[in-house]
Amino acid sequence: MIAALRQATARLTRDKADALLLLFGALMVLAPHFGHLPPWISGVCLATLLWRALITVRGTRMPPVLLLLPIALGAMAGIYATFHTLLGRDAGVAMLVLLVAFKMLEMHARRDVFVVAFLCLFLVLANFFYSQSIPTALMMIASVIVLLTALMSFQFTGTQPPLLQRLRSAATMFALAAPAAIVLFLVFPRIQGPLWGMPGDASAGRTGLSDEMSPGNIASLAQSTEVAFRVRFANSAPAHRQMYWRAYVLGHFDGRTWTRERRRFSTDIPTVRVRGNPVGYEVTLEPGNGRRIFTIDLAPQAPRVSGNPVRISPEVELSATYPVYNRVRYNALSYPEYTLGAVGGLRDHARWLQLPPDGNRRARAWALTLSQLPAAERVNHVLRTFREQPFSYTLEPPVLGSDTVDEFLFATRAGFCEHYAGAFVFLMRASGLPARVVTGYQGGERNPVDEYYTVRQSDAHAWAEVWLDDRGWVRVDPTAAVSPERVQRGIAAALPQPAPFGIEGLGPLLDISNNDSLLAQLRFRFAAINNEWNQWVLNYTPARQRSFMDSLSTMFGNLRMLAAIAGALLLLYTARELRRQRLVDRGDALYLALTRQLARRGFPRQPHEGPSAYAARLRDSAGDKLGNIDAIVRFLSLYSEYKYGPGGRDAALVATMKRTLNESR
């Protein structure tokens, strides 16, 4: 098959081969867009490119404008029907993709070739609207090299080099331009955030925590491996069971959904008493989490985010002033051991006891019996029930009806963290104990390659806080009573993992939950490389650019004295070399004067003769014909020393040569 393909390629004329190369480059640029474009657009593009390839190979005529115009208008109408607009990122990219494909069908002159190539180069940039990963960058580099090769191929008027040589030349051009591009990337003034984060729909379609909770919505996040944020601890990391990343505090329940009450931020923050040593860390937050800023429970002070002030709510929720559309980094300090609000009593006591007026009668009856117990014993009793009764932890719980708490506690007894947290808070409130639901993330996966912890959407979690008069707000995680592995080791350890490809023997090698497996090690290494890419390339913000330029300025400031000394030494060296150059000119000038004199007298120097060979021939053949032959031989000996000797080329030797030359005359 390969031989047949080579024969078919060899039969193509040069124009056809160049056109097919341009088609291939366009396909490389368009292919990554097919992942986010509607299927009909991808199909139209592929059909159009195939049509153009058949026209090229067969040598048939291009379709007339009367046929292309209705197709183009129909495509634009389809874009409007799909996106309900012709503006914006997605609709604009879709139109540009179709424009490149349709332009292939009216490519008649060299000018059209340039138009297609430049449109493809623009689409290379458009790919970064959707992905800025390392594979995408490598794919775009390869696409640019192929497009450059196609452009070069159309420029040759004589014999065209082989394709491999043209590809090598295009790659060389790209490599020569890369240093200039890197310098521009480092020093050219940056806008706030990368270019691909500016369109209004740039963050559309991203998953993340919501400020409300109902059965099933956090379980759906557990299916996502998308990164929420990465963390690097300054010293030793806390235990996995202590990594509670606080996000929302939900206080209102309508019988099915827990929601966050819309309250204005204020300075009325509960008293926080911290114990033990603090944990310092740096968070790299991915876009798509709204205004939420994540810290380990509990951060007494809001971290500083450049250009986006962070506020803290009375429920100790951290929120940025503006939505986080771009990747940001900030440093935080947390105390895993703390007391929240124990001093001064609980304000808005009734607020944390709110429940619907009816519904879930069996749960209310159980809570009535719990109300006879002390507050701390109520908590322990419910947790003990979850632990000892046949409750199970699952991502696919049965669908609940109108009385969600009753059906979960007394019928299905299978659920995810939101089921346990919601039911627990309901029981506490119904028994007269203030309680609330807290959502966020729990845990994080440590990468042993770069020591970063990755918190994914699958780590989304819900827990509870109850008010105890002598201790304030106390965190209680009902899920830990049912599935301790979820809190101690993560969700992957809490859920059963199927055998890879159904083959039990492959488990130790391909099980990603086992950090020692081959697949896990490869994943860790790739994640470390990708994290470095995110930290140093995608997260090169204006603040980091200013820091980089300041460091350069400081470095150059410290090197000013060294630069001055180096400059003085360079001047001295230059003066010395110029003086030696003048001496070289004087010595060679004297030698040239002697050879001219001897040539006029019938004894020219042969081109292959050096000073010593010339002197030997003159002594043997000239004799008394040249008069003072001894002076001539002595001059040539001095010139050899001057030219090749270790101590030659000084003023004294040149002066001696000049006196000897005068004697020879």
Image (cartoon, rainbow, N blue to C red):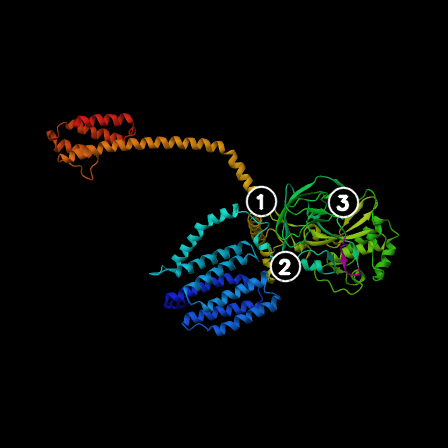
Amino acid type at circle 1 is: Arg
Closest to the observer, 209 or 572: 572
Kind of element beneath mark 1: helix
Q: CA distance from mark 1 to mark 3?
A: 31 Å
Residue 71 shows in this picture: yes
User: Of callouts 2 and 1, which one flags the residue occurring earlier in the amino acid sequence?
Assistant: 2
Q: Quadrant of residue 280?
A: top right
Q: Main secondary structure of the magenta part?
A: loop
Q: Position of residue 608 (x, y in %)?
A: 20, 39
Amino acid type at circle 2 is: Ala
Q: Position of residue 491 (x, y in %)?
A: 68, 54
Residue tagged by mark 3?
267
Residue tagged by mark 2?
204
User: Of callouts 3 and 2, which one flags the residue occurring earlier in the amino acid sequence?
Assistant: 2
Residue tagged by mark 1?
544
Q: Which mark is residue 283?
A: none
Q: Is residue 259 left or right of residue 77?
A: right
What stretch of residues is rendered in magenta? 254-262
